[in-house]
Amino acid sequence: MTANLLIVGTGLIGTSIGLALRGQADVVLADSDDAAVSAAVARGAGRLWNGNEPVAHALLAVPPREVAREFARLHPLGRARTYSHVASTQGAVQQAVETSVGDLRQFCGSHPMAGRELAGPQAAAADLFEGRPWALCPSPQTLPQTVAATRLIAKLCGAEPLVLTPEEHDESVALVSHLPQVTASALAATLLGRAQQDAAPVRLAGPGLQDTTRVAASDPDLWVDVLSSNAAAVAPLVRALAQELAAAADRLDELAAGPADSSSARSAQALSDLLRRGNEGRRLVPVKAGKHDRDFVLVQVGVPDRPGQLAGVLVSAADAGVNVEDVRVEHLVGRPRGVIELLVHATALARARAALSAAGWDVLG
């Protein structure tokens, strides 16, 4: 008996891959944490690997520092024909594998650009990779069949494979993933210091703070590993961000210290420039399968805080033929009411507003 895929590591990513492949592949699971692998099996991500069953491909869903060790352990056993990993850094991992094993023909680095701030098999989701980029980072030695096996996993999970060199990958994720993590953690750490003195301000927090600190809830030990393995690429970006913030603080000091004069006007203009550049940068960020924020608009609907409201709004949108790209619910603290925000394509805005109003919903704005 030969399984299609062995997944070593049943955390968020490994278990999500198993769930995404359910019904498409015979998946076996392994993990040094018995509780984690049992939970992944119970969720239907695959069956327990006995350690001897041959597999077509082995995917190492372990932290970056463990990839080379796992490959060096498994490769001499000959249990798999090809191997890949899904660590969030590539250059250091590939170098470690080359040092420990030497032979990279059966080995391909990869990284799905998807995740959550939660960890473990219970946080896994079958649709985690749907429409997301999945970087493939083969070495010059990697055989075509190894790349093909890695690409197939990505496509079966619903992702969009993208071939990059390890260097290109690490520079890219430093900007779009690792810098946001450091930024969110620094912001949340600043809140902690203030909240220890006075908890009242934090009680006023809304969606803006929730959005910008969401990933600060991520596993610190995992992120120390990730950031350490990509430190050279991340450090200049953190320094550049620090310079932007320091300049903003200087301009705020100037505004706080003096009356409205030419100096104050220049300080205000400098802050305006930062905010406008922020607008421009935000419009570069894809929100869905390569589409950008500029392509979409929000429709806000006020609803009472009772069961069935979200479902009712979505049904009304669907009845009107409006595709909802994303949805968010903003709860109004202390009030029995909330706001449902629907992200729709700009061309569907008028139709969505008219249809929801006709259905009796309180369309805001």
Image (cartoon, grey):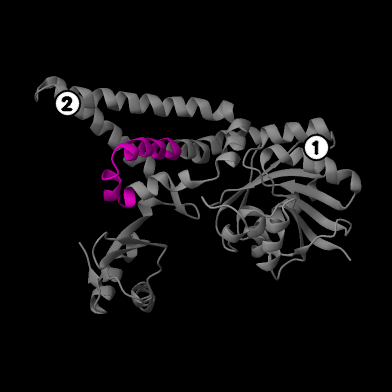
Q: Is 352 or 268 nearer to us in this picture?
A: 268
Q: Is residue 301 visible?
A: no
Location of mark 1 (residue): 141
- The secondary structure that dominates the magenta segment is helix
- The earlier-in-sequence mark between 2 and 1 is 1
Residue 230 x %, y %: 60, 31
In magenta stretch: residue 357: no
Residue 58 x %, y %: 78, 52
Q: Split into 4 quadrants, where in the image is the C terminus?
A: bottom left
In magenta stretch: residue 206: yes
Residue at position x 32%, y 58% in the image: 297
Q: Split into 4 quadrants, where in the image is the N terminus?
A: bottom right
Amino acid at dot 1: Gln
Question: Element under label 2?
Answer: helix
Residue 163, above or below 316: above
Residue at position x 72%, y 40% in the image: 66
Residue 236 x %, y %: 49, 25
Magenta range is 184-208
